[in-house]
Image: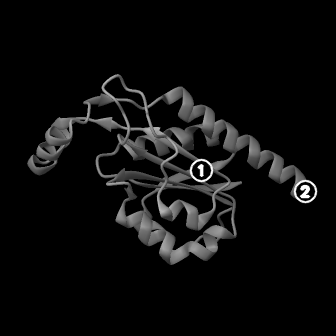
C-alpha cells in the first residue's frame, strides 16, 4: 500500500516521529513517505494516511488544520491514523498526565486510531520569545519521546493495513 505520513513540526521532533513511522511501514513492505502539510495537494494514488502534528496551546499546528480543512472529505474516505506530539501534561519526571487530550481537528477526520506522544524540549533550538514562554510555564527540558512505543504503533498500523488488503482481495 502507498501510505502518506504528513507531519506538522516546528522544531522537527514531530518530523522525526514521522520518519520512524515511515521506516517501520517500509520494513513491513509498504510504500511510505513523509511530507509537510503544504506539500499535499490531493490524495490521488494514496491508499492510507498518517497525520501527525506538534501541539501548541492544545491545538494542532495551523498548517495541519489547513490541510484537514482542504482535504477533509478525501481523508474521511481513506484509512487514517493520527498522532499528536507535545509536552502538555509532561511532568518533571517525564510522565504524561493527560494522554487523551485531542484537538478538535482529530475528531473531524475520525481516525482509525489516535495517539498522543510526549515530545522534546530543546531550548537551544528555540527563539528568545519561545524560551521565555517555556521558562514561565515550567515545561521540563529533555526528550520524552518513547521510540519503542512509536515504532510499535507504526507496526500496528502496518498490520492493520495487511488485514485490510487481505479482506479487500
Q: Is residue 96 above or below residue 42?
A: above
The reply to whether residue 150 is in sight is yes
Residue positioned 63% across, 42% down in the render: 25
Q: Secondary structure at mark 2?
A: loop
Quadrant (top left, top right, bottom left, bottom right) of the C terminus = bottom right
Residue 124 left/right relative to 121? left
Residue 155, x across and y down, in percent = 66, 36
Residue positioned 66% across, 56% down in the render: 2
Q: How many marks?
A: 2
Q: Earlier in the sequence, mark 1 or mark 2?
A: 1
Which residue position holds label 2?
Answer: 169
Callout 1 crowding tier (Cα within 10 Å): few <14, some 14–19, many ≥20: many
Quadrant (top left, top right, bottom left, bottom right) of the N terminus = bottom right
Q: Do residues under tags 1 and 2 come within 8 Å of each other at their CB atoms?
A: no
Q: Secondary structure at mark 1?
A: strand
Which residue position holds label 1?
Answer: 32
Residue positioned 41% across, 46% down in the render: 15
The reply to whether residue 29 is in sight is no
Residue 121, x across and y down, in percent = 27, 36
Color style of the picture: one colour
Residue positioned 54% across, 52% down in the render: 33
Residue 59, x across and y down, in percent = 38, 58
| Relative depth, front residue between 52 and 42 | 52
Residue 125, x across and y down, in percent = 19, 41
Residue 129 left/right relative to 76? left
| Relative depth, front residue between 117 and 127 | 117
Residue 153 left/right relative to 135? right
Find the residue positioned furthest to the top.
93
* Residue 143 picture quarter: top left
Q: Which mark is residue 45?
A: none
Q: Is residue 21 above or below residue 57?
A: above
Work out how far the residue at label 1 is from the one at label 2, CA to CA, in angstroms.
21 Å
Amino acid at each position: 500500500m502507498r501510505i502518506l505520513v504528513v507531519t506538522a513540526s516546528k522544531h522537527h521532533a514531530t518530523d522525526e516521529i514521522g520518519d520512524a513511522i515511515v521506516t517501520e511501514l517500509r520494513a513491513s513492505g509498504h510504500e511510505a513517505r513523509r511530507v509537510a502539510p503544504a506539500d499535499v495537494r490531493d490524495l490521488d494514488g494514496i491508499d492510507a494516511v498518517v497525520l501527525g502534528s506538534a501541539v501548541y496551546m492544545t491545538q494542532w499546528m495551523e498548517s495541519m488544520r489547513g490541510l484537514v480543512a482542504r482535504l477533509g472529505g478525501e481523508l474521511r474516505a481513506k484509512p487514517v491514523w493520527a498522532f499528536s506530539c507535545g509536552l502538555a501534561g509532561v511532568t518533571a519526571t517525564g510522565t504524561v498526565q493527560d494522554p487523551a487530550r485531542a484537538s478538535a481537528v482529530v475528531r473531524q477526520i475520525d481516525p482509525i486510531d489516535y495517539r498522543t506522544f510526549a515530545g522534546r524540549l530543546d531550548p537551544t533550538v528555540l527563539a528568545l520569545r519561545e524560551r521565555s514562554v517555556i521558562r514561565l510555564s515550567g515545561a521540563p527540558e529533555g526528550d520524552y519521546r518513547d521510540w519503542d512505543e512509536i515504532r510499535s504503533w507504526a507496526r500496528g498500523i502496518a498490520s492493520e493495513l495487511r488485514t485490510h488488503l487481505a479482506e479487500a482481495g
